Image (tube, rainbow, N blue to C red):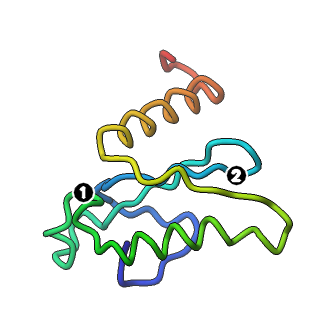
């Protein structure tokens, strides 16, 4: 969530709020929700429970329908709290490091 436009590859220090578990082509596809860490407009938002429900509904609706024109079925398994989100992020980092180890690093 943010008020300013951004672009692919832009790095923004963010505070993770939670994630939506999406099923895309039969596989889990997590969508992490975060806010810019140093943006005072979001100081009061600490978890996805602090986000207006309608905004969460809009995000969920977008991701459930955005591939319909391609004939791809997607569905949502709902929002996950921050603890589960952090575990998923840490697991993704481990998978990435295992798949793409850097020379001199311990995987």
Residue shown at 58% from the left, 52% from the top: 22
Residue shown at 52% from the left, 19% from the top: 104
Q: Residue furthest right?
A: 71
Label 2: few (<14), some (14–19) or many (≥20) C-alpha neighbours in 10 Å:
some
Q: Position of residue 48 (x, y in %)?
A: 30, 60
Distance of label 1 from label 2 (alpha carbons): 25 Å
Give the mark, 1 or 2, whose residue is nearer the N terminus: 2
Q: Is residue 99 left or right of residue 102?
A: right
Name the foreground residue: 88 vs 53.
53
Q: Is residue 96 left or right of residue 68?
A: left
Q: Is residue 101 above or below residue 65?
A: above
Q: Residue furthest bottom?
A: 4
Residue shown at 35% from the left, 61% from the top: 34
Residue shown at 69% from the left, 72% from the top: 66
Determine which of the numbered discs, if any, sits on residue 38 in the image.
none
Q: Position of residue 12 (x, y in %)?
A: 38, 64
Q: Secondary structure at mark 2?
A: strand
Q: Is residue 60 above or below residue 29?
A: below
Q: Is residue 90 left or right of residue 82?
A: right
Determine which of the numbered discs, if any, sits on residue 47 in the image.
1
Q: Position of residue 3 (x, y in %)?
A: 36, 83
> Where, by quadrant of the figure, is residue 9 drawn?
bottom right
Name the foreground residue: 97 vs 42.
42
Quadrant of the snapshot with the N terminus:
bottom left
Q: Position of residue 78 (x, y in %)?
A: 47, 53
Judging by the rendered image, the residue that carries numbered circle 2 is 24
């Amino acid at each position: 969530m943010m008020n300013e436009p951004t672009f692919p590859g832009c790095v923004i220090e963010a505070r993770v709020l939670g994630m939506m578990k999406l099923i895309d082509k039969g596989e889990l596809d997590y969508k992490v929700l975060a806010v810019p860490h140093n943006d005072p407009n979001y100081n009061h938002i600490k978890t996805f429970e602090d986000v207006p429900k309608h905004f969460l509904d809009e995000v969920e609706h977008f991701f459930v329908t955005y591939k319909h024109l391609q004939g791809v079925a997607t569905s949502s398994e709902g929002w996950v709290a921050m603890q589960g989100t952090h575990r998923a992020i840490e697991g993704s980092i481990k998978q990435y490091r295992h798949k793409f180890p850097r020379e001199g690093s311990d995987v």
